[in-house]
Image (spheres, grey):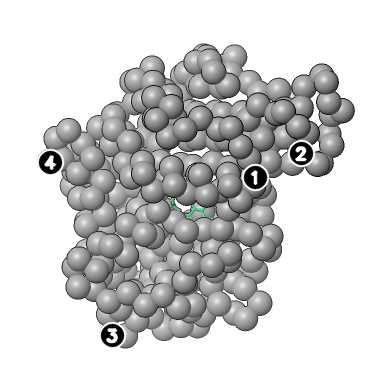
Amino acid sequence: MSRVAYVNGRYLPLAQAAIHVDDRAVQFADAAYEVIAVVDGRIADWQPHLARLRRSLAELRIEGVPDAAALGVIARQTLRRNRLRYGLLYIQAGRGAPGLRHPARDSTFPKDLRPSLIMTCRPVDFRKVAARAAAGVAVATMPDERWARVDIKTVSLLPNALAKQRARDAGAFEAWMVDRDGHVTEGASTNAWIVDADGALVTRPLSTDILAGITRQVVIGLARDAAIPVRERPFTVAEALAAREAFFTSTTGGPMPVVAIDGRPVGNGAPGETTERLVHLYRRHLASFGADPEAALQALGG
Ligand code: PDD
């Protein structure tokens, strides 16, 4: 975690960084967030993350959050004050706290709220992430019990947290959530993919059923550049088990090979060739944000 956090206009030591008890994020999960990779002290894929944050805020009708330039200044200050070189930046923007003039805990939107803004960051040893990707991970499937607008990146993450914990309790690293038709929606904090018999990537198309992952978007671009076909369509757990390869994507781990689903092996039970290619292409993409991309690539696991 950062030693210094930005909270509503101030940079504070973490122990003193707090939000108001009536902040609507606490009572109504009335806030949106982003998690963004930091490479060599620089912010990776800032524009798409910002665009998604803007969209989330628009869908939630939260107005008055600082503009892109101001958010960029605060983000860079937060990284600088924490001397962060490699890690993750967290941004949370919410509707704010009603204050003394308004009755507390009114679910309708009080007028004249000042939106709240939080930024924190933490170091990540990306070599450890690379080691995990080299071995691959297991996933456990379970029903998707979330609300109907998971395309909005809100802090309302309790079903995701419960699913992830259930997966961990079952000895898996990630949960894959399944809709009523038996199709995989996405992971608890990742997008889900398989590689079909033709070597094409298959991932669920964008809709209100999944988050439009930035890593998903980047991987689609990288695959197209590498002439790997991409088919955006839903797939079932049975299809995933019969697939050549499976993986998931997120900012925290990039493309991550899935070697087992519910205790059964995917393919030969080792990370697949296509996934490994994407892992490296994605690492190169991230490294390109560093001042010295070759040094950054080494720090990201080579
Ligand atoms: N999670 N799906 C869900 C439900 C997510 O929470 C996330 C991101 C993703 C992948 O999105 P992206 O590629 O933009 O990181 C998909 C973040 C990292 C988190 O909550 O930690």
Task: Give the quarter of the image for residue 298.
Answer: top left
Instruction: Residue at 28%, 85% (x, y): give it.
Output: 198
Q: Mark 4 points at which residue?
A: 294
Going by the image, does 36 lie left or right of 294? Answer: right
Q: Which mark is residue 61?
A: 1
- First along the sequence among labels 3 and 1: 1
Q: How many marks?
A: 4
- First along the sequence among labels 1 and 4: 1
Q: Which amino acid does label 2 sit on?
A: Phe
Asked if the beta carbon under badge 4 is closer than 8 A to the nearest atom of ligand 1, the reply is no
Instruction: Residue at 32%, 85% (x, y): give it.
Output: 197
Q: What residue type is labelled 4?
A: Glu
Q: Distance between the residues labelled 4 and 2?
A: 49 Å
Q: Which residue lies furthest to the right in this view?
A: 103
**Disc 2 residue crowd, few under 14, some 14–19, many 20+, Cα 10 Å:** some
| Residue 203 appears anywhere in the view | yes
Which structural element holds mark 3?
loop
Going by the image, does 33 lie left or right of 265? Answer: right
Instruction: Residue at 28%, 36% (x, y): give it.
Output: 39
Q: Mark 2 points at which residue?
A: 109
Asked if the beta carbon under badge 1 is closer than 8 A to the nearest atom of ligand 1, the reply is no
Which structural element holds mark 2?
loop
Residue 170 at x, y = what percent?
Answer: 58, 61
| Residue 256 appears anywhere in the view | no
Q: Distance between the residues labelled 3 and 4?
A: 33 Å
Identify whether 203 is placed above or below 153: below
- First along the sequence among labels 3 and 2: 2
Q: Mark 3 points at which residue?
A: 198
Q: What residue type is labelled 3?
A: Asp
